Image (spheres, rainbow, N blue to C red):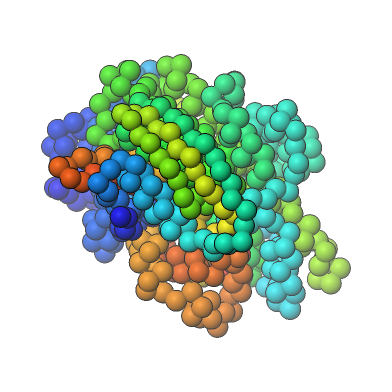
Amino acid sequence: MFKEIPHTADVALYVESTTYKGLFYDAALGLIAISDIDVSNESSIYELFYKDKAYDKETLFVNWLNFIIYQLDSNLYLFDSKISIHRNSIISRCYFRNYKKRNLLIKSATYHNLKIVKLKNLIQTCIVFDV
Amino acid sequence: MEINRIDEFIYEIPLDANKKMNVPARFFADPKQLDIISKDESLKQLVNVATLPGIIGYSLAMPDIHQGYGFPIGGVAAFDTDDGIISPGGVGYDINCGIRLNITNWNRNEIAKFLKNIVEDIYNSIPLGTGKGSLLKLTKRQFEQLVVNGIDWAIENGYATEKDKYHIEDQGQLPVIDLSGVSEKAIERGNSEIGSLGSGNHFIEIGYVSTIYDEDVANKLGLFKNQIVIWIHTGSRGYGHQICSDFVRDYQSVSKKYGIELVDRGLACAPFNSKEGQMYYNAMNSAANFAFVNRQIIAQKIEEVFQTYSRKIKPLKFELLYDLAHNIAKVEKHTVQGKNKKLVVHRKGATRCLPRDKVSGPFSSIGQPVLVPGSMGTASYVLLGDAYALNLSFGSSCHGAGRILSRSQAKREINSKELKENLEKQGIIIKTPSMSSLSEEAPQAYKDVETVVTVVQNLRIANVISKLKPLAVIKG
């Protein structure tokens, strides 16, 4: 689950899920939602393999979202993904399509106050994007 | 949080606001904007900056302060080059996002009946919006020469004149010794976006000089009443974004390596004199050089469009008044408590602002121009650096009006179509590739720029010379 939260100059998302892979996937969907794209269901499907190992979960998370932003800059949006996360590593098979138009350009995911919090049955975080 | 008013327009947050603060925090504000400033997280962010190692004097913010990420927007922080740090978050993702003001010899009446066509032609000539697009095709080697040499590269390749160079902050070239910190991805992104405007708050505006407050100085700047002027607001595009992303990521572990405790990971930094610090400094400077050239190339394209109308109007003179950076960290010499110090001054959403005795070249008799664009549809200002800029703010001034509404709130509360109609009723042409995001940049989403400018004027940081009003806005 994701929802946009107020931020004066940029945009921010609250994301929660019961699993890390759910958190990463929902954050990517939230990012695409705030990018406000006009989707095209007629576009070809592009499959990309993404692999990363990071310093910690937060860095893994920011790297993942910056990967999605990079694809958005290449006119591709994520519509499905099979994600596997183990400690601070991620392996993902991602499926992208071209979009027709994007209304908001996001420059980067930021580390501002970023903390991924694991509760008993829930993992949650807030992420600020620079626009 | 305790906030002490220590002067009419100066507020201070004392050291005990956070036990990790190394210096107090100070911000400049009109008392009637204090409520707005206190509403978001910007003052907390200002305090956070005060915890960074090697910070000198105060963690400062200009009157257009608002919430950013890591550092607040409008923030200024100076660090000792010997034992201080450099922070990519203190510069921002759009390195050398900046503003440029070109002036012409045409007046408002002369352009009136051609304005709509001119706007259309500019809109069709310059890549803008959220997509990619470039006015130039360069090899990787040529691109590297561009980012190392900045405006000198533009002069050599016919995109700028020698005169332009002296009307650009630091003559449009910041020092780059090596590009080892620049990733292939950054080069690839930058090389596909040379001469592009981008989106968000980036814009091209055709305006006119509406009021002159100091006739003599305005003359020296080449400004006259009803004169047609062109603003360009953009930065280093994907090249700068990628460099910042790369270093913010790498600095998460670098900060730890050097034992720097961070109160917010957005403040990730490295000692300025470390290998990692110098790698970012060089990469950041190369992005600043890219941005200077980016604005120069866009201006040249606009000049070409204007030129096509010169037969119908009159022979065109199209000159650069000034071009400056809003997001940058620069090594500068300052006097601190009577001692000369070399500092790395971070300005994130702030403008360098030097009084006349600190400026060489064409502005040595009047001071450095400080350009303050207002929000879409409102007035903008030309100021000159004044006597107290160095004492109060390490030679820094405000950079704009400063946001008050979040983008989502602006979208919810303001209808883009109605906004466009209202602005057009006021005689302002609006052109944008994305109507849905127009409301994000509505005047209601920003503070009153006049109040912001009055603060720096009253503090004698900068002196207002002229007010300019918009005739047409191309929003990216």
Percent across and percent down for residue A4 are: 33, 58
Residue A18, placed above or below residue B431: above
The one of A69 and B362 positioned closer to us in this rendering: A69
Q: Is residue B52 left or right of residue B157?
A: left
Residue B60, placed above or below residue B99: above
In the rendered image, which quarter is residue B122 located in?
bottom right
Residue located at (30% from left, 50% from top): A15
Residue located at (73% from left, 59% from top): B125
Q: Does residue B384 appear in the picture of this structure?
A: no
Q: Is residue B437 left or right of residue B203?
A: left
Percent across and percent down for residue B214 are: 53, 60
The one of B415 and B358 positioned closer to us in this rendering: B415
Residue B230, placed above or below residue B149: below
Q: Is residue A76 left or right of residue B300?
A: left
Percent across and percent down for residue B170 are: 58, 35
The one of B126 and A69 positioned closer to us in this rendering: A69
In the rendered image, which quarter is residue B37 located in?
bottom left
Q: Is residue B260 left or right of residue B222?
A: left
Residue located at (73% from left, 48% from top): B135
